[in-house]
Amino acid sequence: MIARVTQEDLVDILQAFEASGFTRLELTLGPLRVAAKRVGAADGGGVESLASAAQVVAPLLGIFQAGSHSNAPALVRPGTRVQADTIIGFISVMRKLTAVKAGRRGTVAQVLVEDGQFVEYGQTLLQVSTQSAAAESERPESHCVNAR
Amino acid sequence: MSFKRVLIANRGEIAVRIIRACRMLGIETVATVSDADRDSLPARLADRSVCIGPARAAASYLSVDTVVTAAVGCGCDALHPGYGFLAENAALAEACEQAGVAFVGPRPATLREMGNKIRARTLAVRTGVPVVPGSGDVADYERAREVVHDIGLPILLKAAAGGGGRGMQVVREIDELRGAFETASAEARAAFGDGTLYVERLISNARHIEVQILGDRYGKVVHVGERDCTLQRRHQKIVEEGPAVLIPDRLRNGIRQAAVDLALSMDYENAGTVEFIVDQDRDEFFFLETNTRIQVEHPVTEALTGIDLVRDQLRIAAGEPLAFDQAQIRLQGHAIECRINAEAVYDGFRPSPGRIREWRPPVYPYVRLDTHCYPGYVVPPFYDSLLAKLVVVGENRAQAIARMQRALHEFSVDGIETTLPFLRALLQRPEYTAGAVHTRWVEAVIAEPDFADGLGRRDVQTIAARQPT
């Protein structure tokens, strides 16, 4: 028989999971069911494939330019299909432009910066979803269900 | 008028120092950090930090376009370059000017003039400031003999067309001159296609003395005393102190005046340092160069005068006039600074980056510590090895030395190798306490087999013995 699981027990379990290096946890303790997944963990060959969104980051500090010239429409928007060498925008530093490429194949999920915005080195510009749309329903986050 | 927000285009202890000066003036700060410095102390202390590029300095701290874009992008009205990196870069000062950002330093023209050694020397000569006696081009032995007759021995023969030690010969006796001249000339011809030489007096018993100056936009220049930086290794200063009590008063006053004359002659604006070499055998001084920036060892001057040099840099750059006259500047007591580097001295001063496990500096009312380090900080392998500057003041030199010796012994660092054991040993030497040193003394001490042997290894063994297995 299993004694009642306290909140402290639950914290201990989740901490042990976090330290373990495993990416998924499913645990049933009597009436309690706990399911957790490490945020951002790449799920290699699991039971089901989860969506993974790759980040495209600024390769240098400067001003983000979304179009091919200052008044041109944005090169990509949510839903745009991209290849690894698709140019998604430019970084302008003292009027010198550096093209930013998507770096992977997929679909633009979210654009996080606006045209003309100052961006730091390494700042996330947009997210590219690299999995099929079918897997996108399940979001990679940790959750805990009390199934009593 | 004062600045609202300053971009700090530097890292490490000087970035911390500038943030503190800004804070005291009520100015907001933006720290620029490379990818390797995202978690650094300046990043945490500043109102905002902005990542300017990868760890490699060439793509981050050394990129003029990037730091100017960062200043504009973060809404800064001024940029402080610190020392090193782009501090004396005229192109940065110009780019700032064009972007409408005040550069905290001298005007671009001054940076350009003083950055060129030959032009700086010419300006010194024109101002009546003595330079190391030497010749113009010397094409043959007969002419070399005449020059030696004028400036005396020993001398250095150098290739007029190049550098890097090739075509360089030391001549101590007159009968060595012909052989040395022919050798140097042949080497110069082989290396540079031109056998022309020039002759310079060799100062073997030299002291390095430098004068801190401040100038405002309205033509006022003051000196803030001098520092003695004779303890060097490979032209890197190790220990600095002030005032220069080990040279005659007449020389010290002459050096101070020469520094002010030179600064006035170029309408010097902001903080700067005029460096001199003192020939201890002849009691003469000569101009070396002008450093157009705040220097690493500026706390020595601050400890002696109570003047906050970084604060005054910011005020001058904002167009304020100097708030004091020469007569109001008083030097009190004696100050010494030791540079503590992450280096294994017993292993040829090998850099020693890594995690600082223990960091326990001495705490006394007469101690100042400028640092960006703390327990747990990881010293990155990409930049220079300076960890901290330990500064003490005393009523006189003897008291300051005793205090520095105690402070060094109490300073405890674990996890990485530091130059602390080296500094402790160096400051115990009777030559140092007596002041009987010259600019190559430290290298001579390091070369002694007994000296280097006792350093660090024991500390390493102690650390290893303490580690749990």
Image (spheres, rainbow, N blue to C red):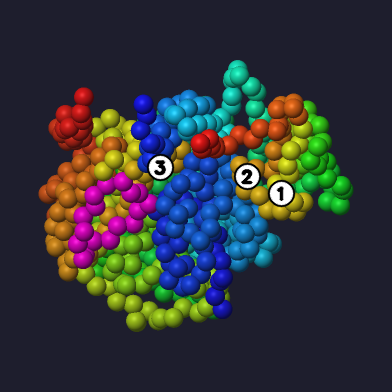
**Can residue B180 be seen at all in this image of the molecule?**
no
Which residue carries the number 3 mark? A7
Whether labels 3 and 2 share one chain: yes
Residue range (magenta): B359-375
Whether labels 1 and 2 share one chain: yes
Q: Chain of mark 3?
A: A
- Crowd class of label 2 (few under 14; some 14 to 19; many from 20; radius 10 Å): some
**What percent of the width, then of the height, locates residue A49?**
65, 23
Quadrant for the N terminus of chain A in the image: top left
Q: Residue at x 34, y 81 (%)?
A: B328
Q: Residue at x 50, y 79 (%)?
A: B321
**What percent of the width, then of the height, locates residue B104?**
53, 64
Mark 1 and 2 residues: CB-CB less than 8 Å, in contact? yes
Q: Chain of mark 2?
A: A
Local SS, label 1: loop
The disc, 3 or 2, on the residue closer to the chain's N-terminal end is 3
Residue B97, quarter of the rendered image: bottom right
Local SS, label 3: helix
Vertical placement of A120 versus A24: above or below?
Answer: below
Which residue carries the number 2 mark? A123
Which residue carries the number 1 mark? A113
Which residue is nearer to you in this view: A113 or B149?
A113
- The three-letter code of the residue at mark 3 reads Gln
Image depth: mark 1 or mark 3 in front? 3
